[in-house]
Amino acid sequence: MTQKIKAIIFDLDGVIVDTAIFHFQAWKKLANTMGFDLTKAQNEQLKGISRLESLDILLEIGKTDAVSNEEKQQLATRKNEWYRENILKMTPQDILPGVKNFLEELKKADYKIAIGSSSKNAGTILERIGMKDFFDAVVDGTKITRSKPDPEVFLKGAQELNIPPEQCLVFEDAESGIEAAKNAGMKTIGVGKPENLPKADKVIPGFKNINISIIENS
């Protein structure tokens, strides 16, 4: 018998808000300071994983010589400072189309809702867009030790909501996030293009014109 979905866990970047351009600008700026460039196609490899893992990929792209752990921390901090400059300018206008209506519909239908994000800036973003107190639980990069595709972030979300993993459904825009949700034993709906999210149970282009029947039919 299929378990009834009782909780919905959302990734933040690319699902609730689109901060991808800010990440790209900051990583590109960092690459440029080190003497190489980062293309939008290469940037796809940096989505949905931790800052230091993204940095390792960036250094590989730039064929950069050995960098000490201390230097890596400095580079990652510099990137984050540039990124934060942009997110501090965010407002409720930056919530993606249809998201707020969808979330309000979930609340009326008594679903538990949570954020499950690798970002250590999730709290800042939620505050800037006026949704800090909207979610029943927020699990972000400050609460986890392992990045997606490890299921830790989603399992902690389920734990904080007090809902079994098999009764949770995850909305994600990154392949590593879909894998993490699957590894947690949860249903998944990808947000984006089907060809980029082949492992998702379903894929939607965004939340515009989407209602909660998509969950009831999952």
Image (cartoon, grey):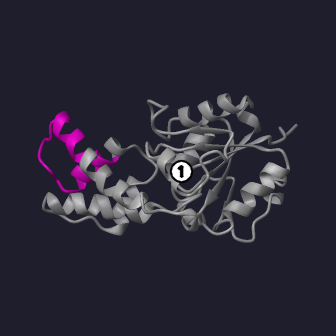
Q: Main secondary structure of the magenta part?
A: helix
Q: Position of residue 114 (x, y in %)?
A: 65, 42
In this rendering, does residue 138 appear at all? yes
Q: Would residue 118 be found to the left or right of residue 207 on screen?
A: left
Q: Would residue 217 be found to the left or right of residue 36 on screen?
A: right
Question: Type of residue at label 1?
Answer: Glu
Q: Would residue 64 be found to the left or right of residue 21 on screen?
A: left
Category of crowding for the residue at label 1, using alpha-carbon neighbours closer than 10 angstroms: few (below 14), some (14–19), many (at least 20): some
Residue at point 34%, 58% (across, down): 85
- Front-most of residues 72 and 143: 143
On the rendered image, what quadrant is the N terminus found in? Answer: top right
Query: Residue 182 lies in what quarter of the image?
Result: top right
Q: Position of residue 143 (x, y in %)?
A: 49, 31
Examine the structure image and report whether residue 89 is included in the region drawn in magenta: no
In this rendering, does residue 218 appear at all? no
Q: Position of residue 162 (x, y in %)?
A: 73, 28
Q: Circle 1 is placed at which residue position? A: 127
Q: Would residue 1 be found to the left or right of residue 22 on screen?
A: right
The span picked out in magenta is: 54-75
Residue at point 30%, 59% (across, down): 26
Query: Residue 40 lies in what quarter of the image?
Result: bottom left
Q: Is residue 45 above or below residue 157?
A: below
Secondary structure type for disc 1: helix
Residue at point 83%, 38% (across, down): 3
